Image (cartoon, grey):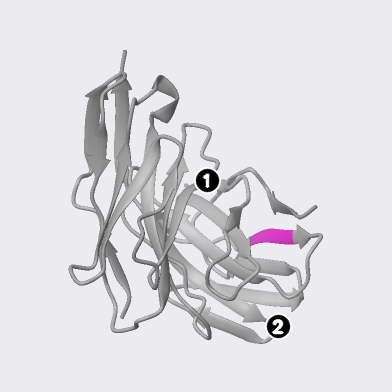
Amino acid sequence: AQTVTQSQPEMSVQEAETVTLSCTYDTSENNYYLFWYKQPPSRQMILVIRQEAYKQQNATENRFSVNFQKAAKSFSLKISDSQLGDTAMYFCAFIVNFGNEKLTFGTGTRLTIIP
Amino acid sequence: SQTIHQWPATLVQPVGSPLSLECTVEGTSNPNLYWYRQAAGRGLQLLFYSIGIDQISSEVPQNLSASRPQDRQFILSSKKLLLSDSGFYLCAWSQGVGDTEAFFGQGTRLTVV
């Protein structure tokens, strides 16, 4: 069974600081994709970053980067130079490549950026 | 370009009444379709997903059902709503083959009274 665990229900950080959100997952598959989605107060889901499991290099998107540890089944999100607009719920998500297509989300971390 | 429409945006229904939430996708073909529920302050619970017409997988056995009458239409239904069915329902689509981004509708806030 596919499971995604986010152990930090809530986090807060001062503006301009760096924050890391944790995510672990469980699967017996070898090929899969991992995602971080952001849900601001508007409730619209927005893709932040994605990582292919077969790539060793960690994905980066501007101020957002991941630390992907395949053996440990860990996929953390680092937000650098945090901005007020980063305040949102962040969800880690997981999908097995080919033939399954079940997109599973974690329970989310509510991140608040403090001015 | 592809768009996803989900309606209604809000719904207040009495216990025991039926439910029908509709989701349609435009600008693509044979999308993967998903229904999620987000209870207050909680994560996204996958309810149903479909990789094609007549191919619907149920993740949570309860009084909800899903149908896909057309390639780009996904409907979430219930014959009799329970109080516990209240929540925020999200429809999503992706092009499939693993990697691609999932796009979400605006959501439906359902309150069962």
- Label 1 element class: loop
- Residue B43 image position (x, y, % from top left): 35, 52
Image position of B80 with respect to A100: above or below: above
Q: Chain of mark 1?
A: A
Residue in the picture at 58% in, 81% down: B56
Provide the major secondary structure of the magenta segment.
strand
Query: Which numbered tag is attached to residue B53?
Result: 2
Q: Chain of mark 2?
A: B
- Is B108 one of the magenta-colored residues? no
Separation of residues labelled 1 and 2 (CA atoms): 25 Å
- Label 2 element class: loop
| In the displayed structure image, the side of residue B50 where residue B113 appears, left or right | left
Do callouts 1 and 2 mark residues in contact (Cβ within 8 Å)?
no
Query: Which numbered tag is attached to residue A45?
Result: 1
Residue in the picture at 39% in, 40% down: A64
Is the residue marked by circle 2 packed among few (<14), some (14-19), or many (20+) residues within 10 Å?
Answer: some
- Residue B70 image position (x, y, % from top left): 78, 75
Is the residue marked by circle 1 packed among few (<14), some (14-19), or many (20+) residues within 10 Å?
Answer: many
Range covered by the magenta-colored residues = B20-24
Q: Amino acid at mark 2?
A: Ile
| In the displayed structure image, the side of residue B25 where residue A94 appears, left or right | left
Residue at the extreme top: A115
Image position of A111 with respect to B28: above or below: above
Q: Amino acid at mark 1?
A: Met
